[in-house]
Image (cartoon, rainbow, N blue to C red):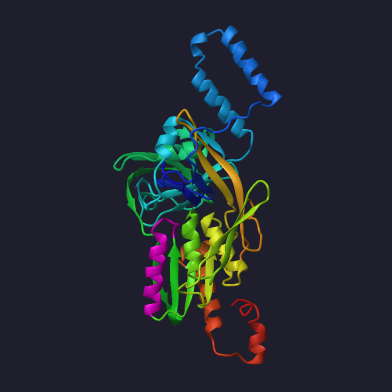
Amino acid sequence: MSKTAKILVVCLLALLLLSSCGLWQTYEHPNPKVPSQLPAEFQTLGEVWGLLYQNYVEPEALNSKQLSQGAIKGMLEALGDPYTSYLDPETYKLASSSFQGEFEGIGATVGIRDGQLVVVSPLPDSPAERAGLRPGDKVLEINGEPTSKMNLEQAVLKIRGPKGEKVKLLVEHEGADTPIELEIVRAEIKSASVSTKLLENDIGYLRLTFFSERTGQEMKQALDDLLGQGARSLVIDLRDNPGGLVQTVVDVATQFLDGGVVLYEVNRQGERKEWMAQHGGMATQLPLAVLVNQHSASGSEVLAGALQDRGRAPLIGTTTFGKGSVNVLYPLKDGSALYLTIERWLTPNGRPIEGKGLEPDFLIEPTPDDIAQGKDPQLQQAIDYLQAKLAPALPQTAALSEAAYLCYN
């Protein structure tokens, strides 16, 4: 790998499937430094190997490569961090692809929640969406193999594959009692990350499905189109958005923030690195409202948190996913790699995202009746909020009743 890639998505692997949350960085590190003296407790590992080598009843079963990989995986599992994991050489080779917005797979994002593999979001018009995969689905089996015995990377790489080939997923929809099997044909995924429409009262609607290398340019074009149509305020829909490239998140934030901090990256020593928006964005003065839900993760949480903390927009919807870790992919000498959590993200006001998520300013959760009738109360709340922002001066009594709306710029 010739350059460092920084990616905010859960354990993003090859974009065949985005995993939810997390920052992925790839470091050219062919010779990781090994401590001159290992902890005394590690001597026990050597003792165990010695006893196996000398006494195990089936010496032909003593595959040192497999046993060492098993020991590494066991050590990492003991950390209790689902985003720190070991990739064997074959897995690492499969995982080493770019984040271009084009890939072969089913077009879905997965993550770990409460120890369970769950779907964060299928991409619009992807094989996953067409087959009926939904946000919040629990993935119980992949081609008949229980996911309970897989880490995130193993699950992702079992789902990926060449276009035209099938993968079978046993999934349990949210609220359902009986799992169903979905057979999905992999395809080449070419998905735009930004879509738009003009709503009533000149309210522009921007939906961001993920943050790829092309999202920054797509956002500029989308804003140009909406402003050209006369949009006077904007709804930014980050629901079911799993994240993406951190630099892209900052570039998108630049369109709505006139400079200033977008997020902080905090290392193990507590040192902070600032990620700053630039000046000259296209929509730094327009009233905004941001839609989020429990599947808004990582990069989308960073953008939402920045707009909320900087007073640019209220968050409308439900509490977000809660993934704010920085992960580094370290290539190792034998062709394998270590995917390691090394830092955390904080919002401009210093709020942690990891394990907490972001609380909305307007808590709105669609009811089963809303869903059945095709209603979107979260979007309607955003429209109501923006209409109030753009309304003429209110009488004093009405102004008092609208105080919640006027606390945002």
Q: Is residue 215 magenta?
A: yes
Picture layout, residue 128 above or below residue 365: above
Residue 67 is situated, as x and y percent measured from the top left of the image, at 54, 21
Picture layout, residue 8 above or below residue 88: below
- Is residue 359 left or right of 17 when viewed as pictured? right
Residue 79 is situated, as x and y percent measured from the top left of the image, at 64, 36
Q: Is residue 313 magenta?
A: no
Kindly give the residue lying farthest to the right in the view shown.
Answer: 40
Which residue shows up at 42% across the image and 39% down it? 95
Q: Start and end of the magenta stretch?
A: 209-229
Q: Quadrant of the C terminus?
A: bottom right
Judged by its main secondary structure, the magenta piece is helix
Looking at the picture, tell me which residue is in the foreground, 248 or 109. 248
Looking at the picture, tell me which residue is in the foreground, 367 or 119. 119
Residue 259 visible (yes or no): yes
Q: Quadrant of residue 2?
A: top left
Residue 83 is situated, as x and y percent measured from the top left of the image, at 56, 42
